Image (cartoon, rainbow, N blue to C red):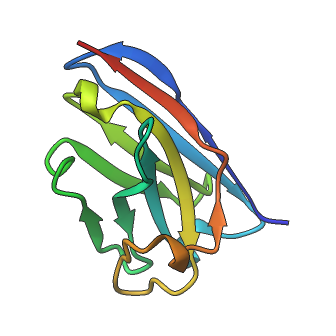
């Protein structure tokens, strides 16, 4: 049984940093492209960041330069380091795994086979 469990939720002020974690079981994160998505209240879920199996990364324009995705194959965990947080970053953040992302990171939700339950990030102004 595959499980992705996010952690690192928090309420922070604008400009602060947070690190989200996604602990995987049932799969090896080094064999999957891993992605982070988010869903703000009243909005559709959107792609935030992803890392292909080969190591290529991709970021949405809204977080580029502020967020960094990384993976620890020993801990079987994927991270999202979020710096210079803004109120518009407030959302539920989801971790996802794609078994087809060898070289490229897809931003399409339906390409990701496994999803976590989400973790809330709130940024106050």
- Residue 41 in the image, given as x and y percentages of width and height: 45, 35
- Residue 32 in the image, given as x and y percentages of width and height: 55, 75
Residue at x 45%, y 45% (from the top left corner): 39
Residue at x 60%, y 57% (from the top left corner): 74
Instruction: Report whether 112 appears left or right of 18.
Output: right
Report the quarter where the C terminus lies: top left
Residue 108 picture quarter = bottom left
- Residue 122 in the image, given as x and y percentages of width and height: 41, 22
Residue placed most toward the observer, 29 or 114 = 114
Image: 77 above or below 41: below
Image: 110 above or below 74: below
Instruction: Report whether 121 appears left or right of 119.
Output: left
Instruction: Report whether 14 appears left or right of 77.
Output: left
Image: 118 above or below 49: above
Residue at x 37%, y 64% (from the top left corner): 50
Residue placed most toward the observer, 31 or 41 = 41
Report the quarter where the N terminus lies: bottom right
Residue placed most toward the observer, 107 or 84 = 107
Residue at x 45%, y 28% (from the top left corner): 121
State the count of labels: 0
- Residue 17 in the image, given as x and y percentages of width and height: 30, 25
**In the orientation shown, which residue stands out farthest toward the front?**
42
């Amino acid at each position: 049984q595959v499980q992705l469990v996010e952690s690192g939720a928090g309420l922070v002020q604008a400009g602060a940093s947070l690190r989200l974690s996604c602990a995987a079981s049932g799969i090896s994160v080094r064999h999957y492209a891993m992605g982070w998505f988010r869903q703000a209240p009243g909005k559709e879920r959107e792609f935030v960041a992803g890392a292909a199996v080969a190591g290529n990364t991709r970021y949405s324009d809204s977080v580029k330069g502020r967020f960094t995705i990384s993976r620890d194959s020993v801990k079987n965990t994927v991270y999202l380091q979020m710096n210079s947080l803004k109120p518009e970053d407030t959302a539920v953040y989801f971790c996802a795994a794609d078994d087809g992302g060898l070289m490229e990171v897809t931003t399409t939700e339906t390409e990701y086979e496994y999803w976590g339950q989400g973790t809330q990030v709130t940024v106050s102004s």
